[in-house]
Image (cartoon, grey):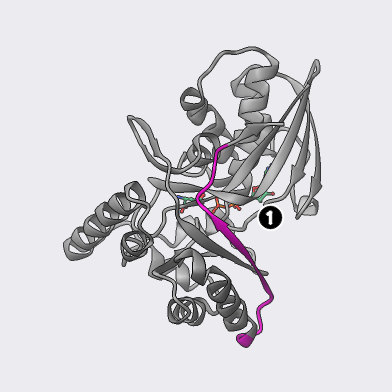
Amino acid sequence: MRTVRAPATSANLGSGFDVFGVALDRPADVVRVEKADETTIEVTGVGSQYIPEDPRKNVVGAVADALDAPAHIRIDKGVRPSSGLGSSAASSAAAALALNGLYDRGYSRQELVPIAAEGEAVVSGEAHSDNVAPALLGGFTVARHGGVTAVDAEIPLVACLPEIAVSTRDARRVVPSRADMDDVVHTVGSAATLAVGMCRSDPELVGAGMDERIVTPARAELINGYYDVRDAALAAGATGVTVSGAGPSLLAVCGGADRARVASAMLDAFEDVGVDARAYQTRVGAGATFH
Ligand SMILES: Nc1ncnc2c1ncn2[C@@H]1O[C@H](COP(=O)(O)OP(=O)(O)OP(=O)(O)O)[C@@H](O)[C@H]1O
Ligand SMILES: N[C@@H](CCO)C(=O)O
């Protein structure tokens, strides 16, 4: 038997669409695997009523297939599905690491990234790795076609999750297929600033580098109160705010001393537009760990 805890993650960070990701210190999924003749799945925890236990529909079924590692898999969800906090990726990453250990497959964490990404293909139709990479490797990650680069960073964060469901599949449909060159240049500048900020653990640079004009405005339309909540977080001291993953969560970067104030401003702003929400005061954290 093997048990692995894999963290929530936030992808894109505004300017790094389908490329940048960070592991969050909390919340997390816990996945326990035992060898079996065929894969069966049991799901408990946050939002488990919305998660299929059929191995063809649950992300961990695809991961077990990819590793040729049939197992009884128990998932204790800490990351709500359709949250923008990498819920499916947390399960995929935890299952990949746990099954790799259970069956002694010998893959490195880097090698497990495309295997865990097979789980993402089950829910969004694409094996994108910007959530599974930080869930496995921790820190700030850059996922490109040639592989993944990861660096540790000390960055305080607030992830604010409203009681709205936005599926990744739907949020990908609103992404424009073309962009103006001015907006592309702006995005490159932001992305470079954000990456330097992560390497320096500098919340000012990371916040400034989240600014993006192509994908974020299209997705903001799916989140009731997005601009009010963003502006409230900025007024409370956040250095940058964007849509987390495909939404509906918002991710704010700030100095450690401002985190509680930013969290409460975001919750108040959601409440003002009649949306219940919860806020995680968190930071860039570690990747999946064995228990
Ligand atoms: N083990 C699992 N954990 C979570 N969701 C799962 C799992 N297996 C299948 N799903 C399905 O995946 C969908 C949630 O995935 P989705 O990518 O939309 O959200 P997310 O992972 O929170 O978001 P994001 O990738 O934007 O951070 C739900 O429809 C859910 O039923
Ligand atoms: N990069 C993905 C992350 C969500 O899983 C998206 O924004 O659609």
Direction from residue 120 to residue 202 in the image, left or right: left
Spot occupied by residue 80 in the image (x, y as percentages of width and height): 68, 55
Viewport quadrant of the C terminus: top right
Viewport quadrant of the N terminus: top right
Q: Is residue 69 above or below residue 209?
A: above
Direction from residue 130 to residue 266 in the image, left or right: right
Residue located 72% across and 50% down the image: 78
Spot occupied by residue 141 in the image (x, y as percentages of width and height): 41, 42
Q: Quadrant of residue 33?
A: top right
Q: Which residues are magenta?
A: 272-287
Direction from residue 51 to residue 152 in the image, left or right: left
Spot occupied by residue 116 in the image (x, y as percentages of width and height): 56, 32
Q: Is residue 273 above or below residue 260?
A: below
- Residue lying at the far front of the rendered structure: 257
Q: Amino acid at mark 1?
A: Arg
Residue located 62% across and 77% down the image: 267
Q: Is residue 127 above or below residue 235?
A: above
| Number of residue marks | 1
Spot occupied by residue 76 in the image (x, y as percentages of width and height): 77, 43
Residue located 53% across and 27% down the image: 115
Near-viewer residue (127 or 202):
202
Is-magenta flag for residue 277?
Answer: yes
- Residue lying at the far bottom of the rendered structure: 272
Is-magenta flag for residue 222?
Answer: no
Q: Circle 1 is placed at which residue position?
A: 80
- Label 1 crowding class (10 Å Cα cut-off): few <14, some 14-19, many 20+? many
Residue located 73% across and 35% down the image: 31
Q: Secondary structure at mark 1?
A: loop
- Ligand 1 under 8 Å from disc 1 Cβ: yes
